[in-house]
Image (tube, rainbow, N blue to C red):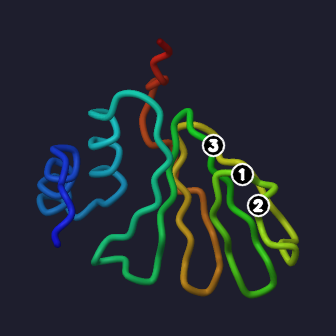
Amino acid sequence: MKEPVGIESIYAEIIYEKNKDLLSAVRSAFEMIHGAYAIVFMHRDYSDSLFVAKLGSPICIGRAEESVYISSDINSLPIDTSKAAALDDNRIIQINKDCTMRSAERCVGKQTRTRR
């Protein structure tokens, strides 16, 4: 069964195919999303990496000696987690297969979540 695809995904793919800049494509797609989100995603051209992004919703990353964990609650991380941090809003983190991480940069400029 094929997962539904949102217009943001289609838009991001078009931008990526045009200039091969994944972060630019992701930022453009996130500008279209309204409300809170916490997203973990992969891209076929970056198959050795996971990307984590958030706005408003909780998400944290924990690091153990040879593992990286992603959770919505820091208290749910495994006991062997030696370091943990909650992500800031509008941030993209790249987690590589060798467990190295880097903060890619801000997803979007001034986007804020909408409270109702």
User: What's the residue type where badge 3 is placed?
Assistant: Pro
The residue tagged with tag 1: helix, strand or loop?
loop
88, above or below 3, in the image: above
Q: Are marks 3 and 1 in contact (CB under 8 Å)?
A: yes
Q: Which residue is mark 1?
A: 73
62, above or below 24, in the image: below
Which circle marks residue 76 in the picture? 2
Q: Nearer the viewer, residue 96 or 18?
A: 96
The residue drawn where x is 45% and y is 83% is 48
User: What's the residue type where badge 1 is placed?
Assistant: Asp
* Occupied quadrant, residue 14: bottom left
Residue 16 at x, y = what percent? Answer: 20, 59
* Occupied quadrant, residue 79: bottom right
Q: CA distance from mark 3 to mark 1?
A: 7 Å
Residue 110 at x, y = what percent? Answer: 46, 24
The residue tagged with tag 3: helix, strand or loop?
loop
93, above or below 99, in the image: above
Q: Are marks 1 and 2 in contact (CB under 8 Å)?
A: yes
Q: CA distance from mark 1 to mark 2?
A: 6 Å
Q: The N terminus is located in which quarter?
A: bottom left
Residue 103 at x, y = what percent? Answer: 59, 57
Q: Nearer the viewer, residue 41 or 100?
A: 41
Judged left or right of residue 33, residue 62 is right
User: What's the residue type where badge 2 is placed?
Assistant: Ser
Q: Earlier in the sequence, mark 3 or mark 2?
A: 3
The residue tagged with tag 2: helix, strand or loop?
helix
Q: Which residue is mark 3?
A: 58
